[in-house]
Image (spheres, rainbow, N blue to C red):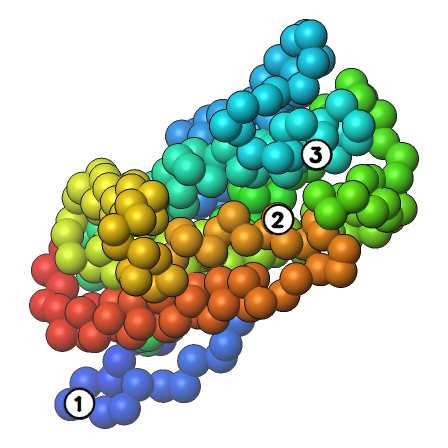
Amino acid sequence: MSVGETSQLRMPEPGGAARPRVRMTTRFLRSELRIIFGRRRNQAGLGVLAVVPIVIAVAVKASSGPARGGGPDFFASIVGNGLFVALAALTIELTLFLPLAVAAISGDAVAGEANLGTLRYLLTVPVGRTRLLVVKFAAITIFAFAATLLVAVVGAVAGLILFGGGNMTLLSGSQISMGSALLRVLLTVAYLAAGLAALGAIGLFVSTLTEQPIAAMIAVVILDVAMFIIDSLPQLAWLHPWLLTHWWTSFGDFFRAPMAWSDPTRGLLTAAGYALVFFLAARARLGGKDITS
């Protein structure tokens, strides 16, 4: 939200009078989204996300056969149905690229405003700190969904061009129609976006602790990598169910017959818990913070 836009709102009345009631609009959110998607560095980041599924599709097409070994099961299924390129790309990008993109946006949410000196101006008008954080988190969530959808769409298009479509053979061996397969891919996008939005809530909280967006971004990426590392250690198996990233790959259950909902449901509950806790932590931090910039 620009200073020019905020200046159109009424200022608090003198003498400690209550602030005037503000008409709720989406202008603040639309302005935030324009900033996020209009920045060249964010556009470049989305471009990198889109390139990965294309590289996967071309690499599998150029190889003598489907990828084998320690990779995800989706790679072995690509030659049978191009939609699996989208799933393979999402699996690969979940380890770093997608969390990095969300970390960059969430880390900049409050720290970026403070670094530029615009945070104080936002809060001198009747915007409110809670509303500020709600709009910031909504924008992070929308970006997480858009980034995940971009990877899936580019992967699906590239895969269908190079390998074709038709009925999809699920991981359990049964087949479903192309329409049902597309619905399951969209369900996967929504599920992963929810997990990434929860990571964005962590970034939003970290962003209230510093005025350096890069520091906030690095902290979130380190935390994300740490959770992946801990999740790979069998000695810490008791901790795995409490890790946000532990449930991300559960979207594979959407491609079985029948669909298994146990792990994805636990994943959504875990993501909701992380989002709530860290959003409230961000509100508590920003609510008691003396804004000087």
Do the CB atoms of the residues marked 2 and 1 lie less than 8 Å apart? no
Mark 2–mark 1 distance (CA, rounded to whole Å): 56 Å
Q: Position of residue 33 (x, y in %)?
A: 49, 50
Image location of residue 86, percent across then percent down: 66, 35
The correct choice, above or below, for 40 with respect to 279 in the image is above
- Regarding mark 3 in the picture, which secondary structure is present there? helix
Residue 281, numbered circle: none
Amino acid type, callout 1: Gly
User: In the picture, residue 40 is in which quadrant?
Assistant: top left
Asked which secondary structure carries label 1, the reply is loop
Residue type for callout 2: Gly
Question: Which of disc 2 and disc 3 is earlier in sequence?
Answer: 3
- Please name whichever residue, 64 or 133, is drawn nearer the observer in this view of the structure: 64
Q: Distance of mark 3 from mark 1, alpha carbons?
A: 60 Å
Q: According to the image, label 1 marks what residue?
A: 16
Q: Nearer the viewer, residue 29 or 62?
A: 62
The C terminus appears in which quarter of the rendering? Answer: bottom left
> Of circles 3 and 2, which is in front?
2
**Residue 63 in the figure: left or right of residue 52:** right
